[in-house]
Image (cartoon, rainbow, N blue to C red):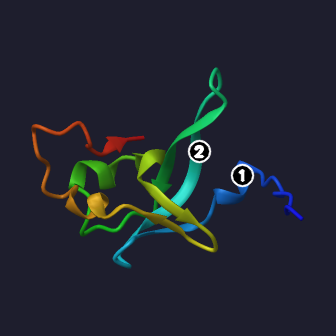
């Protein structure tokens, strides 16, 4: 017998701590960015940022938005790809940069 999935509201993500897959604290989910036309989550707005990971510009803003495609798992905490750990060393050739909120 196939188990039915119980839909969860996306608002349950708000307030969850975000960690890299290596266990480094990234921040806390403050809001969700949605694409209403496609009805998909496109990003997580984070605040309470890890000062060691983000530039002073990002820390002085309200927070950052990370692409939802970086999310690896959601449970009691949100686990994201370890690329977030490399944000403090921006590479001009990538489009994977922090976005001040």
Image x and y of residue 13, in percent: 64, 58
- The structure residue drawn at horizontal position 47% and vertical position 54%, both measured from the top left corner, is 46
- The structure residue drawn at horizontal position 62% and vertical position 25%, both measured from the top left corner, is 38
Image side of residue 75 versus residue 19, left or right = right
Image x and y of residue 83, in percent: 27, 58
- The structure residue drawn at horizontal position 48% and vertical position 46%, both measured from the top left corner, is 68
- The structure residue drawn at horizontal position 81% and vertical position 52%, both measured from the top left corner, is 7
Tell me, yes or no, if residue 72 can be seen here.
yes
Tell me, yes or no, if residue 62 can be seen here.
no
| Image quadrant occupied by the N terminus | bottom right
Q: Note whether 31 is above or below 17 in the view shown.
A: above
For numbered disc 1, what is the local secondary structure?
helix
Neighbourhood count class around disc 2 (C-alpha, 10 Å): few under 14, some 14–19, many 20 upward: some
Residue furthest toward the top? 37
| Image quadrant occupied by the C terminus | top left
Image side of residue 66 versus residue 78, left or right = left
Neighbourhood count class around disc 1 (C-alpha, 10 Å): few under 14, some 14–19, many 20 upward: few
Relative depth, front residue between 9 and 60: 9
| Residue denoted by label 2 | 32
For numbered disc 2, what is the local secondary structure?
strand
Cβ atoms at labels 1 and 2 below 8 Å apart? yes
Q: Quadrant of residue 15?
A: bottom right
User: Label 1 vs label 2: CA separation?
Assistant: 8 Å
First-in-chain label (1 vs 2): 1
| Residue denoted by label 1 | 11
């Amino acid at each position: 017998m196939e188990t039915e999935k119980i839909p969860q509201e996306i608002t349950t993500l708000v307030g969850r701590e975000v960690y890299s897959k290596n266990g480094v604290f990234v921040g806390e989910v403050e809001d969700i960015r949605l694409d209403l036309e496609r009805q998909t989550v496109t990003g997580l707005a984070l605040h309470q940022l890890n000062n060691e990971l983000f530039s002073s510009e990002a820390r002085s803003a309200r927070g950052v938005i990370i692409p939802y495609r970086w999310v690896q798992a959601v449970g009691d905490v949100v686990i994201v790809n370890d690329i977030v750990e490399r944000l403090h060393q921006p590479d001009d050739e990538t489009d994977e940069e922090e976005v001040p909120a």
